[in-house]
Amino acid sequence: MEPIQQTYQMPTADQQLLDNGQGVIDPDVFFELNTPPSNLADFESKLTAFVDYHQEKNTRLVFITSGGTTVPLENQTVRFIDNFSNGHRGACSAEYFLDAGYAVVFMHRQFSLQPFHRHYTHNASMGFLDYLVQKDDDTIAVDSQYGNKMKDVLSKYRAATESNRLLFLDFVALSDYLFKLKSGTRILARLQERVMYYLAAAVSDFFIPSQKMHEHKIQSAGGALTLTLDQVPKFLTPLVSVWASKGLIVSFKLETDDNLLVPKARQALTRYGHQVVVANMLHTRKQTVTVITQTSQQVISLSQEDLANHVEIEDRIIPQLVRIHDGWISSDATKACQQ
Ligand code: PMT
């Protein structure tokens, strides 16, 4: 018997007028059609306090986005589509940026990997309690075989948090992420060229606008389900030209077809006019990346020896980006002198 298909394609007249004729709405329209997250005011006040503090200290700051966004299928969400990313790239990078003297805003998918904590979470064979032992006097301690490494990680973590150089902020759904991206970049904009935007989050390219979504849990009684997803507007366009125009913008390009990787990364640089794309392949992203700017292309790879010594590729990527940021800041200073 043919399955009965449920379809949820209900474009309103308004929606049709607002898109660009190709089914893609303008980024500004996205914010009019979607409801801001309920914790946006809290997000803004934490970020504003952090930026005030670092503006006075003249610190360099990196805004890292990390982890994947979800796309809900129902307004009262039971089901959602997820994007690939466990947040390793972002969490790991945050630690190397702290080592390089940056203050870090770590905007991550809730419950994805976090800097420092990542060494003890999301491990298939070790849970939190497996690091602990119960002693004869009934107190609890860290198992001595893990103690030395944990002491190192803990002291770096404490140093970052006690000096107020690490701010954790989170998101879950695509619209949550986009509202916070817009608001966050605008708050950071006053630090001008001192901010690097490191957009490692895996952001969905397709979504269901809330007016087209079912309010309640989709029922299975109707048979098979057919979904139509709209295209998400390309938010790098307003981010580069308006929201964060003075900062150094590093976007990522993830592909699975090797032949597409560098051309698509170059295409992004041309289309958006920003400074850096870090291009990576799904299956080799921890061993090799290509850092592409308007005028250069550098492959960064780990050798077999590096891998045997547990070197992380972010240990090589971040110093390279810091050098590019040095150049960005001094070229801005040169421009200012010439005016
Ligand atoms: O977290 P891990 O498991 O370690 O994985 C890391 C990673 C592979 C997710 C990371 O290294 C990476 O490549 N992140 C970017 C993935 C991605 O969304 O690529 P994209 O080609 O779809 O988007 C390219 C850029 O455009 C991204 O910087 C994204 O933030 C931005 N974008 C995407 C969609 C959209 N509608 N607007 C955007 O601005």
Image: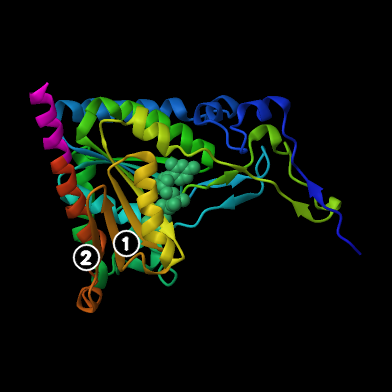
- Residue drawn at point x = 53 percent, y = 47 percent: 205
Measured along the vertical axis of the image, is residue 29 above or below residue 67? above
Give how far across and how far down residue 248 sits, in percent. Answer: 25, 39
Foreground residue among 2 and 331: 331
Give how far across and how far down residue 134 sits, in percent. Answer: 34, 67
Residue 149 image label: 2
Residue 262 shown left or right of residue 312 in the figure: right
Give how far across and how far down residue 329 sits, in percent. Answer: 15, 36
- Residue drawn at point x = 65 percent, y = 34 percent: 210
- Measured in 3D between alpha carbons, the distance from the residue under mark 1 to the one under mark 2, in whole angstroms, is 10 Å
Give how far across and how far down residue 11 sits, in percent. Answer: 72, 34
Q: Is residue 332 magenta?
A: yes
Measured along the vertical axis of the image, is residue 116 above or below residue 171? below
CB of mark 1 near ligand 1 (< 8 Å) = no
Q: Is residue 311 visible?
A: yes
Q: Is residue 46 visible?
A: no
Would you say the residues marked 1 and 2 are in contact, meaning their CB atoms lie under 8 Å apart?
yes
Lower position in the chain sequence, tag 1 or tag 2: 1
Foreground residue among 306 and 215: 306
- Placement of the C terminus among the 4 image quadrants: top left
- Residue drawn at point x = 49 percent, y = 57 percent: 84
Q: Secondary structure at mark 1?
A: helix
Residue 119 image label: 1
CB of mark 2 near ligand 1 (< 8 Å) = no
Q: Quadrant of residue 327?
A: top left
Q: Quadrant of residue 106?
A: top left
Measured along the vertical axis of the image, is residue 195 above or below residue 109? above
* Residues rendered magenta in the picture: 328-339
Q: Amino acid at mark 1?
A: His
